[in-house]
Image (cartoon, rainbow, N blue to C red):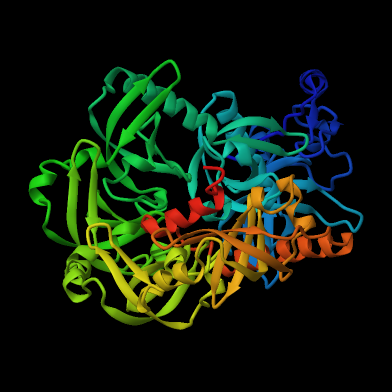
Amino acid sequence: MTNHTSIESDQPTAEELAEEEGVVVDALTGQVITSSAVSEGISPELLHDPYGEEPLSTSRADFEAMLADFDAGFQDIKEGEIVQAKVLRVTDSSVILEFGFKSEGSVALEEFKDPPEPGQEVEVLLESLEDDDGVVVLSKKKADFLRVWEKIREAHEADRPVKGTLVRKIKGGVTVDLMGVDAFLPGSQIALRRVPNIEDLIGETYKFKIIKLNKRRRNIVVSRRVILEAEREKKRETLVKELLVGQVREGVVKNITDFGAFIDLGGLDGLLHITDMSWGRVGHPSEVVEIGKALDVKVLDIDWNRERISLGMKQLLPYPWTDIDKKYPVGSRVRGKVVSITNYGAFVELEKGVEGLVHISEMSWTRNVRHPSKVVSIGEEIEAVVLKVDPDDEKISLGMKQIEEDPWLALPMKYPTSTRLSGIVRNLTSFGAFVEIEPGIDGLVHVSDMSWTKRVEHPSEVVQKGQEVGVMVLDVDAENKRISLGIKQLQDDPWPMISERFAPGVECDGKVARVQEKGVVMDLGDDIEGFVPASHSGIDDASRLEEYYGDGDPASLRVIESDAANRRIVLGVTETPKRRPQEAIEAARAAREAAKARASSDSDDDAPAPKVPKPAPAAARAEEAEEESPAES
């Protein structure tokens, strides 16, 4: 039985015309073709041929039977229909077909997926019985398209999913091979979430729902998301009834962010936060999970109102801080890997989920560590001593320097008071100089212990950074890690002789050393200084002292007080000086500011401020000498 399919038009009137006038609709162009009705019966001329030379010897009934058999060899063929054809032969470029009653046509070989065999029957579309060259036009590809289109139309009308294969990525989406026909899959319809790498899906086969069909434009739009959403909703309904806090469920990693990973539980997504992935330190979620990987998670919290599910992985493992104080008792030695460095110390991983902090102050007994990175580095394995364990706050304090014996404990015996040493000036501050007496051990020479007679405003007046100097040990405080050193103590105290030389009432000459707020410091020679209070300077307004006294100006003086015990000489001027020129006053002020700036730059202010011992009593008394005079007191 010959099988042929007529092409339907999108115009509703075409069907009416087909029924009423025998109109055939072109499936590809939508053109309406009207054909003449074919009358039934046998022409009388066939039974009685007046021009025949011999009368027919066949009866009417036999002739009608023979004619019916002959008509069976014909197909009721029309242009625009799919017809059955037989392969006569195959050439290098085409396939020669026979259809109808001894009608022949050819189809390009490339329209066949597999080359046919002679004698094989195939379906082709009769595009034209005769073109401009008088040749029959056939198409295997268009016939296949029409057959597939019917199946696609039926699936669309029945809302039935169809299988397809992703072929190639195009602008806005992907082309899908749907039973040999290209369909368009928009990017938003590929999955429930945006697909970052569409190329990875090329070649995959999925089920699709046809969401748009336009036969005239041969346009098919499909969606995979619609199917996934339907499946998700079914699973979600089941999951909502089953899901409980505390359950352990299997999920698949759907997406990874900086703060965690989204896990598909089979209809619902849950968030596995980075802090719930491991008891240990996790730099990025990708270190623990990967997209598409199946894993077990524990349900930590459910908020149906906000549709949020919190998941955890580390909760499936034992809590590492249980009995941690027994595992790492105070005083025990441990080994671990440095996993993080901050300004205040380094965190050391003792085991997964257990870290201890080595504070910067616990890294060295002797070194002045400015930053932990100067001592340790990330990934380095170190040894330390447990100093403190706090299970409640999950904190362990560690010490690196405790691995070795504290060298400060032996210093009092090694450097008893009055020991003479030599060392290198490592740092200058406004209150003194730090001198290294052995590697890592510094002592402080306070400004008050640099000279017996001269008031030292800044240590740079006596020593320079990097200079080797002789010092004497004044005190060793092992507990507070302090050593007090002195330079002036290397010599005998000259004040008993000075007090005799500058007895009260003695008149002498001196030079202005410096002007201060409450008086003037005078240089009496031999590094001996005396102080002229403002009340004995001959100037009524103390704020104008610098207008009358300049550095290096000579002055006639009289000793008012000489105190060997407090190491001070109080003076008064015998002649009131004249006011200095304004230019000299301004130059002196500028020089004084420059000197302050240089002194400030000489100090190593970037270094952490060391602990400073209290000034010696003599220094305290010297400071008091500038603030009051015998007359004022």
Q: Nearer the viewer, residue 570 or 100?
A: 570
Relative side of 272 to 410, left or right: right
Asked whether residue 38 is in view, the answer is no
Is residue 417 toward the left or the right of residue 464 in the image? left
Give the mark count.
0
Residue beneath the point at 54% across and 24% down:
158
- The image shows residue 470, relative to residue 151, as above or below, that is below
Residue 385 visible to the viewer: yes
Q: Residue furthest top?
A: 305
Q: Position of residue 179 (x, y in %)?
A: 56, 45
Q: Residue 516 at x, y = what percent?
A: 65, 55
| Residue 262 position (above or below residue 267) | below
Task: Provide residue 241's location: percent of width, then percent of height.
Answer: 30, 17
- Toward which corner of the image does residue 319 lie, by quadrant? top left
Give residue 351's position: percent from left, percent from top.
21, 55
Which residue reaches farthest right? 132
Q: Is the residue 144 above or below the residue 243 in the image?
A: below
Front one among 279 and 147:
279
**Would residue 186 appear left or right of 626 to someone viewing this image?**
right
Name the residue located 34 percent from the left edge and 51 percent from the top edge.
Answer: 288
Classify residue 270 as left or right of residue 111. left
Q: Give the quadrant of the N terminus.
A: top right
Identify which residue, 176 or 381, lies in the foreground: 381
Image quadrant where residue 583 sits: bottom right
Which residue occupies the foreground of this view, 346 or 533? Answer: 533
Residue drawn at x 79%, y 36% is: 26
